[in-house]
Image (tube, helix red, strand yellow):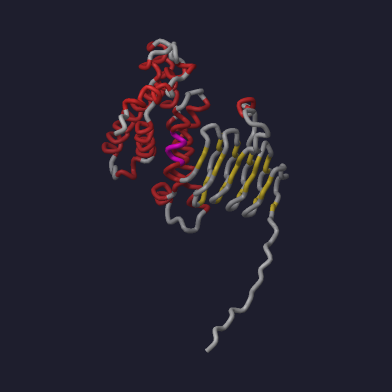
């Protein structure tokens, strides 16, 4: 019979990390994905407490207080772990001080972020005839859940918080099928209709009143040589989408190019060059052939 212990040491050796060898194991603990998932739910309840049944100022205050305290605790713990993982030599006191700065800055901006989310929900309602109310958009549309998490994750990412923003984006990616890198900068009144399969890369910049449909990719061009990806850190690799642009389903826009304001991109377009403002980009109409069905013998 096979004895698993005979293989234990060899397998354990595969866990060694050269950049962490000098750090005690307790100082290299990663934030937990289940905490980040709980945090995502807390932010949804924090920004939209009315959808939990709060009907009075007293119940609203109680609900917001509870969710704010829980979100603050989870976020503080996760950010501190991420900081210690990236810099295990840092003291507990310094890591806590940096964590407190990040969390306090986010809390100060919660009202502004909620204001942007309200505009996103309104854009969804105004842009979709199937929407019956703004509340329905908030409750039912995956893009609202994705944007709620993204606007928080993006704020933390721009402040240089390690790991946690990307973990947040991957949690919501798995739930909605919408993949938005926390580095992407998205303006006001943004709406993704349906949402499934949308990809928005790290250095994407999106203006105000932009609308995307399912399957849209705002991506980077392929890296020509293996191992060169790290050389492009910080470089602008993804598109800039100016104000009042609509991009229809399954369009692919690649590279550091600009889609000019007030343009419309048709479904299935493949774009690698900048498009001037007020353009209509159409794909070739497919040839349609109709043939009669063969009748079976009587």
**Going by the image, does 291 lie left or right of 71?**
right
Region in magenta = 168-173
**x and y, in percent, of residue 213 in the image:** 55, 51
Quadrant showing the N terminus: top left
> Residue 122, relative to residue 91: is it above or below?
below
**x and y, in percent, of residue 113 in the image:** 46, 34
Q: Can residue 177 be seen here?
A: yes
> Looking at the image, which residue is at 63% across and 76% down?
291
Closer-to-camera residue (197/293)? 293
Residue at the extreme bottom of the image, as rendered: 298
**x and y, in percent, of residue 131 in the image:** 45, 55
**x and y, in percent, of residue 128 in the image:** 50, 55
> Looking at the image, which residue is at 53% across and 43% down?
189
Closer-to-camera residue (107/184)? 184
Q: Is residue 43 magenta?
A: no
**Going by the image, does 162 lie left or right of 242?**
left
Q: Can residue 104 be seen here?
A: no
> Looking at the image, which residue is at 51% across and 51% down?
193
């Amino acid at each position: 019979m096979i004895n698993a212990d005979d293989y234990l040491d060899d397998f354990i050796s595969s866990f060694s990390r050269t950049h962490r060898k000098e750090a005690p194991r307790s100082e290299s603990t990663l934030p937990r994905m289940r905490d980040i998932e709980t945090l995502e739910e807390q932010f949804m309840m924090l920004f939209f407490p009315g959808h939990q049944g709060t009907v009075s100022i007293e119940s609203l205050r109680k609900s917001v207080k509870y969710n704010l305290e829980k979100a603050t605790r989870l976020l503080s713990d996760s950010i501190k772990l991420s900081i210690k993982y990236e810099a295990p030599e840092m003291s507990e006191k310094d890591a806590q001080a940096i964590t407190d700065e990040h969390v306090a800055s986010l809390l100060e901006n919660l009202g502004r972020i909620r204001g942007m989310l309200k505009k996103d929900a309104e854009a969804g309602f105004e842009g979709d005839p199937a929407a019956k109310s703004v509340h329905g958009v908030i409750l039912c549309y995956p893009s609202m859940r994705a944007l709620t998490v993204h606007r928080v994750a993006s704020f933390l990412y721009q402040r240089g918080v390690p790991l946690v923003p990307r973990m947040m984006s991957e949690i919501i990616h798995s739930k909605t099928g919408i993949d938005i890198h926390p580095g992407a900068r998205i303006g006001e009144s943004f709406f993704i209709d349906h949402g499934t399969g949308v990809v928005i890369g790290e250095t994407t910049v999106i203006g105000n009143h932009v609308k995307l449909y399912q399957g849209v990719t705002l991506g980077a061009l392929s890296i020509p040589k293996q191992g060169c990806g790290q050389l492009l850190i910080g470089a602008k690799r993804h598109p800039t989408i100016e104000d009042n642009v609509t991009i229809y389903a399954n369009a692919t826009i690649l590279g550091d190019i600009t889609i000019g304001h007030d343009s419309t991109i048709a479904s299935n377009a493949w774009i690698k060059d900048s498009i001037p403002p007020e353009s209509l980009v159409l794909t070739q109409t497919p040839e349609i052939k109709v043939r009669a069905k063969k009748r079976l013998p009587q």
